Amino acid sequence: MKGLNFSAIDTRPLWLVPVLALVALPAVGSLDTWLTLTVAGLAMGMIIFIMASGLTLVFGLMDVLNFGHGVFIALGAFVATSVLGGMGDWTHSRELWRNLLAVLAAMGVAMAVASAVGLAFERFIVRPVYGQHLKQILITMGGMIIGEELIKVIWGPLQIALPLPEAMRGSLIWGEASIEKYRLMAVVVGLCVFVLQAWTLSQTKVGLLIRAGVQDREMVEALGYKIRRLFVGVFVVGSGLAGLGGVMWGLYQQNVTPQMGAQVNVLIFIVIIMGGLGSTGGALIGALLVGLMANYTGFLMPKLALFSNIALMAAVLLWRPQGVYPVANR
Amino acid sequence: MTSPQDMLLSLQGVHTHIGAYHILHGVDLQVPRGELTLLLGRNGAGKTTTLRTIMGLWPASQGRIAFNGLDITAKSTPDIAALNIAYVPENMGIFADLTVQENMLLAARNARHAGQMDAKRLDWIYSLFPAVQKFWNHPAGKLSGGQKQMLAVARAMVEPRDLLIVDEPSKGLAPAIVQNMIDAFRKLKASGVTILLVEQNIHFAQQLGDSVAVMDNGIVVYSGSMKQLSSDPDLQKSLLGLSL
């Protein structure tokens, strides 16, 4: 199969991220502070992308509005508290490889649990309401509330600390700029997830079917493929990625609460709407914009942090009402 | 006279409801093996609904649809397609964001990548539809209407199929392109594939059709040979409101 056809890619949305960063530079004033904020924003954006990429495909493939996606994020984060809590010797070690193994174990278990719960969520909550948007919103929000309460039953209602393993704490100092090690790691993990996802979507037959299904699922079925099976697969992988994102978000915030999924949900929906529902490339750009905007405004005008993202979404939708990468045929 | 065994596809008393609307009121249709059957009729007669019902895209509420003697009435669309039935919908069903090659690969169910598509068959398809080869690596959304229609039919035939169902292949095409399409269907027919076409273009229908069914108000009001219909102006007027 041929790779991504770059000549066919609309490159204008790609400029949004550097343009936003460059516009923020004079407002921030100091180059070092700007660098710190930019790396933090990119890290936050990558984590949001990991959480949002599954959701945008779920909507694209089956028109399913899953407002319960946040519960997989919270679940992943809480599973990480248990896994990392039980690996104290590994997380308190000053050896980076032991820390990394502990975090990888937490990520693996969180993804497995979130995927398994995602499978049950699709079967019992989403499947009965295919094609009924209002019911989907109500029942998936209900599912999230139940999920949150179950998290409280298992882990308790209070905030739980999720400290970074020993060797991942601290910052790298570059000039006057301070770049947290964990944020760099988040950028690397996010890039790995994006590359793997882009490769799967562009180089494999399953990826081709997903891209085609997002555009016209009826035609994919008429070609002889069972799109519901594909959808279940995407839903499960998307839930697993949300679990992975939950671990990374929990470590980014260094604490977890049962409500964290609902809070992040707002950002995720801003991202997938801005990116174009069903577009993973759009979700990446949307997530990076949201991450950068949140960090710049958090520094310049803290009270406007959430509003700034909604304003950003409004501006993007005024430019492209279907999102930066509208999916054809939708 | 053709025997029931010679019928590749047969519909008996098929009814279809879409929401509150009762669209098909007992369609009886026979598609002889190896022939090109045309489904004619005015707008809103139920032709597209008949094709969609055959493909399981809208379920039949009553009646029986048999393919190769197998009852497919309650089967799902992917299961029906897997019986070697190719379908080209009225809107062509082209994936605009995918390249021509990717569109073709999707229809090649046995190929996991482009290299696994049958090269000889592709060469044959290129000879029928040169635009497919010319724009192989281009996004399908950038093709003209005629090129898209050629791609849609080429895609349907990327692997050997027993039945090809096409909804209005000449719709919106320039006369020169329509002639290309007629030539291509002639060659497809010669390859032995059974074809069921919905068509409004009478010139197109007359040149290709072996047998014909005319629909009105959700039922088949006439079935016979194209030759018979072409030679009877009174029949044409009464069924279609025009002379061929």
Image: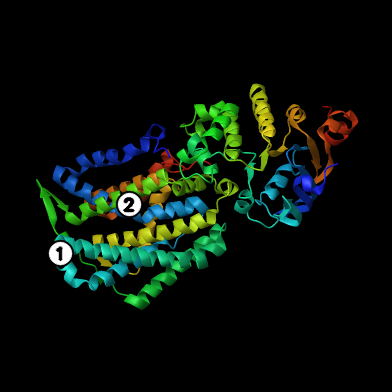
Share a chain, discs 2 and 1?
yes
Kindly identify the residue that appears in the image at 46 percent across and 54 percent down: A58
Tag shown at residue A272: none
- State left or right for residue A94 relative to residue A219: left
Q: Earlier in the sequence, mark 2 or mark 1?
A: 1
Residue A19 sits above or below residue A99 on the image:
above
Q: Nearer the viewer, residue A296 or A247?
A: A247
Badge count? 2
Q: Which residue is mark 2?
A: A193
Q: Which residue is mark 1?
A: A166
Residue A142 sits above or below residue B18 on the image:
below
- State left or right for residue A226 relative to residue A281: right
Residue A52 sits above or below residue A282 on the image:
below
Amino acid type shown at disc 1: Glu
Q: Quadrant of the N terminus of chain A?
A: top left
Assess disc 1: are there few (<14), some (14-19) or many (≥20) residues with their C-alpha within 10 Å of its C-alpha.
some
Report, in whole angstroms, how far the alpha carbon at label 2 lies from the one at label 1: 24 Å
Q: Chain of mark 1?
A: A
- In the picture, residue B2 is in which quadrant? top right
Q: Give percent across and percent down for residue A23.
A: 25, 39
Kindly identify the residue that appears in the image at 25 percent across and 67 percent down: A255
Kindly identify the residue that appears in the image at 32 percent across and 60 percent down: A244
Amino acid type shown at disc 2: Val
